[in-house]
Image (tube, helix red, strand yellow):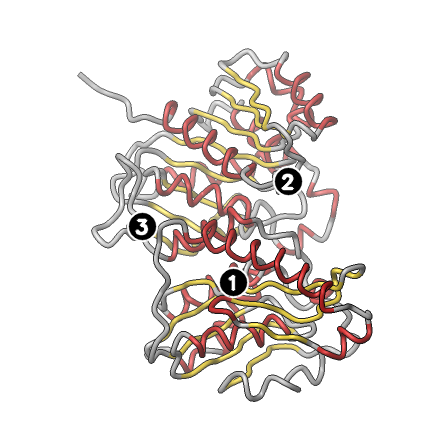
Amino acid sequence: MVFTDRIDAGRRLAARLRHLRGQDLVVVGLPRGGVPVAAEVARALDAPLDVIVVRKLGAPFQPELGMGAIGQDGVRIINEEIVRLVDASADDLAVVEARERAELERRQRRYRGDRARVPLARRTVIVVDDGIATGSTARAACQVARAQGAAQVVLAVPVAPPGWTAGLEGEADELICLETPAGFAAIGQWYADFSQTSDEQVAACLRQAGGPAPAPGAGTSPNGDPAVDEEVEIQAGPVRLAGRLTVPESPRGFVMFAHGSGSSRHSPRNRFVATVLNQAGLGTLLFDLLTKQEEADRANVFDIELLARRLVDTTIWLRDRPEMRGLRVGYFGASTGAAAALWAAAEPDAGITAVVSRGGRPDLATARLPQVTAPTLLIVGGWDEVVLELNQQAQSQLRCENRLAVVPDATHLFEEPGALETVAGLAREWFIDHLAPVSHP
């Protein structure tokens, strides 16, 4: 594998694009997978982030095979060779195009909401995707940027097949790709984590990059940015762990994230939830529970006692930070991380005020559940039947204030439209209710 995930790819791509810093830049991502990559590039280059929505025209009986692509402003690209190969008629093409045009319009509204486009006229536009396969969507995006008046177009991707520039030279002024591996078959094979990016995550990237207005009572600086947003190194027992600390001005409380097996502090789902909490005035800490060397041993991933100990050590580290100022702390755990959060919450030294579990495995902390005193919210997808049953059994063993929230028509990863937003909203209300500052007479 070449890249850990899209966040890793974005940061490495940003390093390659440093020569553009200082120009009048706009970074545009291709939804959905290209947007998390583009968000990291925009952050590193201190540039605004937007999207260019394009849609592949999939062959009628082979939708993964692109007959071309369409984009905003009437851009339309047809690959006549593929059309002949799949023997698609003009009517077949028209049906696919009408369907994709409607989806294109829907996504534009979904991603931007009421926000206007970032103007591209007379600016250098960096078009970013998570990779290139056939190049149709990248070509369409570059043409959209030209149609909107871009002075210069740079097409930048982490990975593409050898010879990927053929047919693209005239579309962009500069073509940049980090890796062109032999044996390229699909973009996803060059990522360790290529999980699907949701509409909610795309919208969250745009909101965060655009400095949205804070929620009522939220604490942000005058320009809408967090007071602190930095990578940190945490001393947890004998090891040092990497994390991301985000603190609004005048925070209402802190939430620490415990990710599940196979995930990390870069989890797009946890990052989305963290953004929603930040907008509500809550500080967040996303961090890796294990070092890279420890993750190589799968036994560590399921050593709940070890993960809980790391969580408690990190909680102690966090309380020593000046930003804490005696604020209350909650845990947000996903999958096995939820078991670690509940185990750690049962420790008297942790002093945890609230716990939220997303698609969690509280059954892995069965021995400690009766000792948990922090109010606990268990969130499970309605279609995640096995995990739902495990949560119902665990709930019967909790002696603290607790609630089981079932998100209808959602599976384990909450990838369905609106599901992750529901999770984030439930978590936000739970933490706001239980992390409110203590009033002293």
Query: Which label belongs to residue 226?
Result: 3
Q: Is mark 1 on a helix, strand or loop?
A: loop
Q: Do the residues labelled 2 and 1 touch (CB within 8 Å)?
A: no
Q: Residue at x 54, y 52 (%)?
A: 266
Tell me the mark number nearer the camera, choosing from 2 and 1. Answer: 1
As rendered, which of 99 and 390 lies closer to the eye? 99
Q: Are marks 3 and 1 in contact (CB under 8 Å)?
A: no
Q: How crowded is mark 1: few (under 14 residues within 10 Å), some or many (20 or more)?
A: many
Sequence-first disc among 2 and 1: 1
Tell me the mark number nearer the camera, choosing from 3 and 1. Answer: 1
Residue farthest toward the front in the current orientation of the protein: 91
Q: Is residue 385 above or below residue 396?
A: below
The residue labelled by disc 2 is 413
Q: Which residue is drawn at 60% across and 84% down?
A: 168
Q: Residue at x 53, y 37 (%)?
A: 311
Residue 87 sits in quarter:
bottom right
As rendered, which of 361 and 83 lies closer to the eye? 83
Tell me the mark number nearer the camera, choosing from 3 and 2. Answer: 2
Sequence-first disc among 3 and 2: 3
Classify residue 253 as left or right of residue 132. left
As rendered, which of 233 and 46 lies closer to the eye? 46
Q: Residue at x 48, y 48 (%)?
A: 235
Tell me the amino acid under the disc marked 1.
Answer: Val
The residue labelled by disc 1 is 53
- Point out residue 210 in the picture as x, y percentages from the top left corner: 35, 56
- Point out residue 112 in the picture as x, y percentages from the top left corner: 42, 53
Residue farthest toward the left in the current orientation of the protein: 441
Classify residue 379 as left or right of residue 211. right
Tell me the amino acid under the disc marked 3.
Answer: Pro
- Point out residue 388 in the picture as x, y percentages from the top left corner: 68, 24
Q: What element carries label 3?
A: loop
